[in-house]
Amino acid sequence: MMEEVKEGSVLSVQTNGIKVSEVVKDGDSLTFIIISQKLSGTGEYHVARTYDDFDWLQQHLFSQEEVPGIQGIIFPPLPARAQVNPSAKVMKQLGLLALGDWKPYGAALEQFLQQVASHSVLCKNKALEDFLTSTEPPGRQKSKKNILNRLSQAVEGLRKEGHKDVEDFFQNERDLNQALTNCTKVVAEKFLDVVQTEQKISVACGHFSAALQMCVESAEDPDKQDFSRVCKSLSEVFSSMGKHMLSVAENDTDSLGLGLDLDSRYQDAEKEMLFRRTCKLVELEAAQRNAERAKPVKKAAMEEVKKTTETEFNQISVMAKQEIMELKRARVQWFQRALVLWCEKQLVTAKKNTEQLNLHLEKVRALA
Amino acid sequence: MATSSERSPPPFPDSEEQDILQDTEDEIGQQQQRDSDYGEDEDDELFMSTISDPPDTDTTPAVTSQNTDPSLESPIDDPMMELVSEPSDSKPAADVLSEPSDEFEDLSNTESDTNDDPMAKTDTTDDFFDLLGSESESKKAVAQMEVTHTAEIQLEKEVTPALVDVMLDFSLPETKLEDTVVVLGSDSNAKSDLSVPETRPVEPLLDSPLKVEAKMQNAAVVDLFGDDEEGSDLFAEPKLSKASKLPQKSLFEEVDNNLFPEPLGANDKKPVTVSVPVGLEPKAIVTKAEVEVRSKASVLTEPDDFFSEETMVTESAQKMQSGTTSKTNGLQEEEGDIFAEATVELSLDSPRNERKREPSKPSPPTALSAAAGLSPPEALEELEEEEEDDDKFEIQVSVKAPEKVGDGMTAYMAYKVFTQTSLAMFRNPTFSVRRRYSDFLGLYEKLSEKHGPNGYIVPPPPEKNLLGMTKVKVGKEDSSSVDFLERRRGALERYLQRVVCHPTLLQDPDVREFLEREELPRAVNTQALSGAGFLKMINRATDAVSKMTIKMNESDVWFEDKLQEVESSDQQFRKLHALVESLVLHRKELSTNTASFAKSTAMLGSAEDNTALSRALSQLSEVEDKMEQLHQDQASNDAFGLAEHIADFIRLLGAIRGSFDHRMKAWQRWQDAQSMLQKKREAEAKLLWANKPDKLQLAKEEIAEWEAKVTQYEREFERVSATVRKEVLHFEKERTQNFKRQIMKYLESLLRSQHQLIKYWEAFLPEAKAIA
C-alpha cells in the first residue's frame, strides 16, 4: 500500500480523495457512490458502481501481463461480494463488514480503492482511471478468470503449499504469514463476537427501556406519579445506556474492526502472492531439471525456457520482497492508526456516557 | 403464599358457634376459677356494669339501670354487658341486665365515695357516650364477660356481695366474670379511690399475673390480638404464649393485664375522666396494659377509643372463653365485630374501627400504645403517617456466609442471620443465628398462616430451586452455583428485611424466635413451595382471584382498580424481569467474548514479528482481560441490582394478590352468611304462617344468630379490606422508594465501572501511539 503518489501517475484524481460516500440499496443489489477529487483541484467525479464493477477492476489489475513481476504484487484485497440479504455463509465470509447497514462495507471498498490508487504499479492501470471517472459502468460483462483464479489455487495449493523455498526470507515469510493469517482470523472473529454482543446489549437495553415506559402511567395519585417518574428515569438511563453501547459497537467496527478485517484480507492477499511465487519456483525448478536432463537437441530450448522462467521468478521475487516490506510497514501503520483511533473513540464515548450517567444520577436523586 | 385464606381453624370457631364457645368458656372459666379460686364473684360484674354505666350514668343512675336493661336486650349495654356476661357465658342476658344495674349503682356509690365526682363522671360520660354508642352493641357481651371475669370476684365480693347474689340469681355460672371484675378493681385502685378497698385485693392478683405476663405478654398480647380476630385462635395462642411464662395467665390473664395498664394510665392522665372510664376501661385496660405502659397519654386523651378497644378485647377474650354471649340477640355478632375491631386496633393493622369510623392505628406493636391512644384514625392518611413512623424501626437484618453443611443429597446450605437492632424488644443489640433455607420457608408459612387471612401482605421468600441447589449439593464450584448462592442469599436477606420492616410481622413471636433463638425446630412441610411450583402457585391464586372477582359484585372501586393494576404491573414486571435476565445473559456473553478476544489478541501478539506491534497487542490483551472483569461485574450488577429486585417485586405482587384473595374469601363468607340469614328469615315467615310458636322461638334464635354472624363477617370483611388497602398503599410507597434506591445504587456502580473503563483506555492510549 504505497502512500506516495508518483509523479507520472496517470490518475487524474487525488488518491486520498477517493471516497465511497454512500451505499444505495437498490432492490437486490447494492450500488456504491464513489466520489473522487480531481487533481486539478476543481470539481469532483461522482460515479455509481456495483460490486461487479469492482470485480472487473480487480480482474483487470490481475491480468496486467505486461508488467514485469506482476505476480509478485500483493494485490489490495477486495472484500467478498455483498448481498442485500446475505445468507449465513456470506455473513460469515463478510464478518464484520456485514454489520451496520453496509457502512463498514463501503469503508472497506473505499480502502480498497485508495490502496489501488496509491499503489506504485497498479495506479498506472487504465482500468482504474476508467473505473473512477467514466460515467458509464466499465465492465458489466463477466471478465474471464485468469490464472490467478482463486479456485484453481485452492486445488493446487494443497500440493504446493508445503514446497520448501530456496530463499530463507521467503520461507520465513511464508511461515509467518501462515501463523498471522490464522491468528488474525481468530482475532477478527472474536472481535466480531464482541461487537455483536455489544449490539445485542444495546438492543436489550432498548427493550428494557421501552418496557419501562409501559410502566409509566399518568395517574393523579402522587405515589403512583412518583413511581412513574422513577420508572421513567430508569427508562432514560437504559435508553442512553443502549445508545452508548451502540456507539461503542460502532467505534469498534469503524476502528479496530475495519483494521482487523483489512489485515486479515491482506494476509490472504500476501499468501496468494507468495503462493504464486511458489508456483513459479516450482515451475522454475522443473525447468532447471528439464534443462539439465534435456538431450542436446532440446537443450537450447530448455535453457531458453529455464532462463525465461528464471527471469520471471527473479522479477517476481524482487517485486515480492518490495511488496512484503511495504506491507509490513503499512500494516504496522494501519494497526497503530486503528488502535489509536479505537482508543480515542472509546474514551470519548465513555466520557460522554459518564456525563450522561451523572446527569441521570442527579435526576434520580432529585426525585426524592 | 398464604393460600390458606380460611381463618386459622382454631379449636373454637368464631363466636358463631355459641355452644362450643360456651363450653370452652366454661372450661376457661373453670380454669380461671381454679387458678384464682375466686368464687363466682359477681361483684366484679357489678363493677363492670357500673363501669359501663358511667357513660349512661352521666345523666343519672337511672340511665345506668336503663343500660343494664338494654344490655339484656339492647345493644347499649353490650360492651359491658357482654364482658360481664361472658364470664357467665351461658348466663342469659337477663343476668347481665340485672347485674349491670346493680353494678352501676354500686359503682356510682363507690365512685362517689371515693374520688369520682358526678361532675367528673359527666365530663367523661360524654366521651363514654360515644364509646357506649359504639360499644352499646357489644355491651351485652361485655356484661357477660364481666361475669366470667369473676376470677377477681373476691375483690368484688367484698365490694358488693349483693351484686354477687344477683349474679348468682341470674344463674351465672360464670367464673370468668371474676377476671373482668378484677380488672375493674385494679383499675379503680390505680385510678384512685373508686373502689379502693375492694379493688385492692383484686389488684394483687391481677397485678402479679399481669406483671409477669406484661413483659412477655406485650408480644403475646399482640399475638393474642391478632388471634383474637380469629376468636378461636385467641384462646389457643394465649395459652401457648403464657404457658411458658404464666401457667395461670391464659387468655384471662392477658386480658386483665391489658385492662389494668390502661385504666392506670387513664387515671394518671385524666383524673376527671378516670371515673367515667373506669367502668368502661377495665376491659380496655386489659388489652392495652402494655400500651399504656409505653404511652399512657394517648389513652387518656381518648377514653372512647380505649373503651371501645378494651371492650373489644375483652369481648373477644370472652367469646373465646365462653360463647354465652351469643344469648343476647345479635349481641354476639356485635361482639365478634368488636373483637375484630379491637384486635385490629391492637394489632394496629386494621386502621378502622367500625364503630369509631376511625381507622384504628396500624402502628407497630411497640407503637400500639401510642397509636391506640392518639389517633382517632380518620383515614388512610393517618395510616400512612404511621407507616412512616414504622419505617424508623431500627433493625437491620443481614444474611451472610452461606456454608454447606453435610454431604451428598442431604447437604444443605446454612446462612448466618445477623441482626442489628436498637429495639428494646430484643435481648441484645446484635446477635446472629444460623438458619437454613427451609427455616426461612417455615417462617414464611407460619406468618402467612397467621397474618395472611387478615389481609396482610406477608413478604414471600425466594422460591425453591432444585436445580440450583442440586448443583451446590453435588459440590460443583462453577460460576452458576456461586451465582445461585449469591442470588439466594440476597433474596433471603431482602425477604427478612421486609419482614422485620413490617410493624405487625416484627411483633410476631415466630419472627423473634427466628432471629434470636439458637436452635429452631426443623421446619417441615415446606415441600409445597418446592421448585417452580411457587410461581405457578401465584399464578393459580391469581386465576382463582380473578374468577372470584367475576362473581364478586365489587362494592369498592378502589379494590377493583387495584387488582387490575396489580395484575398489569405483574405482567409488566415479568416482562421486565425477562428482559433484564436476557440483558444479564448478554453481558455475560460479552464478558466471555472479551476474554477470548483477549486471548486471541495475545496469540496474535506473540506471532507478530514487529516488536512494537507485538508489545502493543499483548498490552491490549491485558486491557481486554481487565475489561472482561468489568463486564463480568456489570453482569452481576445487572443481575443483583436489577433482576433480583424485580423478581422480588413479582413475588410481592403475588403476595398482594394473595391478600386480595383473602379479602375475597372474607367477602364470600359474609355473603354466604347473608344468604343463610335470608333463608332463616324465610323459614321464620313460613312458621309464622303455619302458626307454630314453639318452632318460631327456635327460628328467631337462629335468625338472631345469623344476624350476628352476618354483622361479624361483614366487619371482618371490612377489616380485611382496610388492612389490604393499607398494605397495598404501603407497598406502593415502599416500591417507589425501593426502586429509587436501587436505581441510584445501580447508576453509581455503572459510573464506577465507566470510570474504571476510562482509566484502562487512558493507560492504553500511549501504548497504541508508541507503535510506530
Image (tube, helix red, strand yellow):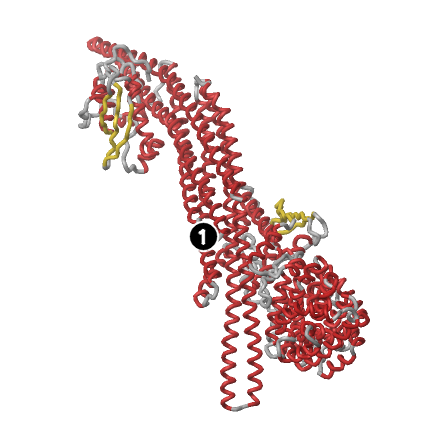
Q: Residue at x 52, y 71 (%)?
A: B670
Give, as a three-letter code, the residue at label 1: Ala
For residue B259, side relative to residue A322 (left or right): right
Task: List x then y, in percent, for residue B744.
Answer: 53, 41
Return the chain for callout 1: A
Q: Name the element at disc 1.
A: loop
Task: List x then y, in percent, for residue B522.
Answer: 64, 57
In which quadrant is the C terminus of chain B drawn?
top left
Q: Is residue A324 above or below residue B91?
A: above
Q: Nearer the viewer, residue B682 or B465?
A: B682
Q: Callout 1: few (<14), some (14-19), or many (20+) C-alpha neighbours within 10 Å?
A: few
In terms of image quadrants, where is residue B455?
A: bottom right
Q: Residue at x 59, y 77 (%)?
A: B330
Residue with the most extreme front position: B119
**Disc 1 target residue:** A219
For residue B404, side relative to residue A61 (left or right): right
Q: Nearer the viewer, residue B19 or B478?
A: B19
Task: List x then y, in percent, for residue A98.
Answer: 33, 33
Q: Is residue B388 above or below residue A94?
A: below
For residue A80, side relative to residue A357 (left or right): left
Task: List x then y, in percent, for residue A8.
Answer: 25, 10
In terms of image quadrants, where is residue B317?
A: bottom right
In which quadrant is the N terminus of chain B drawn?
bottom right
Residue B30 is at least partly visible in this image: no
